Image (cartoon, rainbow, N blue to C red):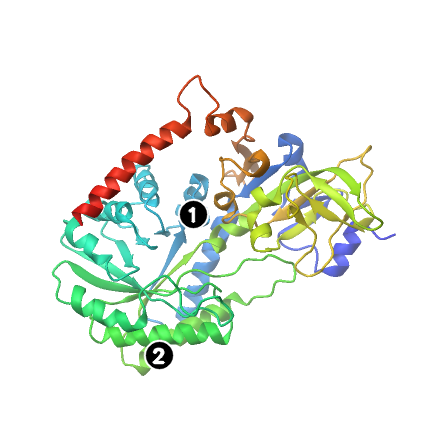
Amino acid sequence: MKTYYDLIDQTFEFPTLEFNVENDSLLFNNVPLMDIVKEYGTPLKLTYLPKITEHIEHAKLLFKNAMKRHNYKGTYTYCYCTKSSHFRFVLDEALKNNIHIETSSAYDIPIIRELHSMGKLNQNTYVICNGYKRPLYTQYISELINDGFTNCIPVLDNLKEIEAYESAVTADTVNLGIRIATDEEPNFAFYTSRLGVRYSDVNELYRSKIQHSKKFKLKMLHFFINTGIKDSAYYWSELSRFMYKYCELRKICPDLDSIDIGGGLPIQTSFQFKYDYQAMIDQIVESIQWICNKNNVPVPHIFTEFGSYTVGESGAVIYSIIDQKLQNDKELWYMIDGSFITQLPDSWGLGQKYIMLAVNNWDNPYQKVNLGGLTCDSHDFYNTEAHSADLYLPIFDQEAEDQYVGFFHTGAYQESLGGYGGIQHCLVPAPQHVIVDKDENGNFRTRLFAPEQNSEVMLKILGYNSAEPGPTELDATEAADEREEQEALIEKD
């Protein structure tokens, strides 16, 4: 009977630059995963930091090549979309590469201030502030600008947002952006995005609120569609529509010199992933330049805010198979020591598929299986792959050997969507998190970022710890204070 290695080898082009097998076990970016499993146990989340730098450098090179090829006169600025992963170790690694930041929440701003105090970024760093903004968010943005962050650019999401900066910003100049509400993909539930200012209102917003202001300057138009950057008629149509609006506005607004084309560079979620990154960026740059030349306006500086692309492929989750259950004549379940619902919520909520591979026993024969999570929810399972309706893993003797399985490229959004460090379905604990890096000699080094969540933490969150005020009481006090602060801002406005 063929081995699990034979199955993977005949199904895909394997090994790859990222995945290989030595001594019957899987390597991830040359990291021997079984060594980490033996040291830390499972379940565990893993972040391979060098992958973040690798992707940032790659994106910068893509735009550098495209701009050189087309003699593009504008510049390129790489921003990291913090909502993909707010962890300090992610920001520390990303900011080593001379990048900038895009935010989406009031609570991003204290992170910006903390990074500034640590010397990770400076007051010239671009901070692109997106999202629908409540009073606390506009207050924090205003304070950041007042304190000398000259490249903090609030991107207006609605017609009234600018009023918050009129009263709160004391700096001489506020550089603004406007997010334009794009049409959604034809099969989406809505015709137009709920985010941003509709096309027909953009010019009037500029004329009535910005054009004659001594304080405001419109520097940027912002573009984003949910489907990401892909070679489809829908994407090119929306990008062209956006660029024609940029050219129209540029003719009446000489300060406008930049566009933010959002995020959306895809990551590999299957071995059958095919995407020509350079060709796509070449075509984006060429299209922007062609439309600007046709309209006789200077080409804009280009900003991107890549989130998943920055951090997604750095992540992995490793589980142990703790039981085998044959529930009928043909449905065999491998039970994992974790939960898909709480630890890989995109796999449950969106049907997202990841690269799934056995970590060990590659020389064993294989069989069709279903993977089951620990919660009592019937939807806590994973049983198909992106390329196949079936899932295969090695056959193993549960009494004599262990079996581990890994899910890869899980580094974006899963912790925040799963409620990291909080209360999760069936009180399944957040797994331990291990960071993998390289030292100055290129040797791998690991460290435990956080242990597995324990019962004391959960009891405190739930208010059962009577020895001292639990976080529920403290959070209620803080929430009340914040509500009073926001109500005061609303009344002031």
CB under 8 Å between discs 1 and 2: no
Q: Secondary structure at mark 1?
A: helix
Question: Which residue is more in the foreground, 460 or 3?
Answer: 460
The dot on residue 317 is none
Judge by depth and name the residue closer to the eye, 143 or 69.
143
Residue closest to the eye, 336 or 482:
482
- Residue 5: image x %, image y %? 77, 51
Q: Amino acid at mark 2?
A: Ile
As drawn, the residue found furthest toward the bottom would be 294
- Farthest residue in the right direction? 1
Question: Residue 175: percent from the left, percent from the top?
Answer: 22, 58
Q: Is 129 positioned to the left or the right of 39 in the image?
A: left
The residue that mark 1 highlights is 94
Residue 388 occupies quadrant: bottom right
Q: Is residue 272 left or right of residue 333?
A: left
Residue denoted by label 2? 291
Residue 473: x %, y % from top left: 38, 27
> Is residue 314 shown above or below 434?
below
Q: Is residue 328 above or below residue 194?
A: above
Residue in the picture at 70% in, 52% down: 383
- Residue 455 x, y percent position in the rendering: 55, 26
Mark 2 residue crowding within 10 angstroms, few (<14) / some (14–19) / many (20+):
some
Instruction: Give the quadrant of residue 387.
Output: bottom right
Can residue 323 be seen here? The reply is yes
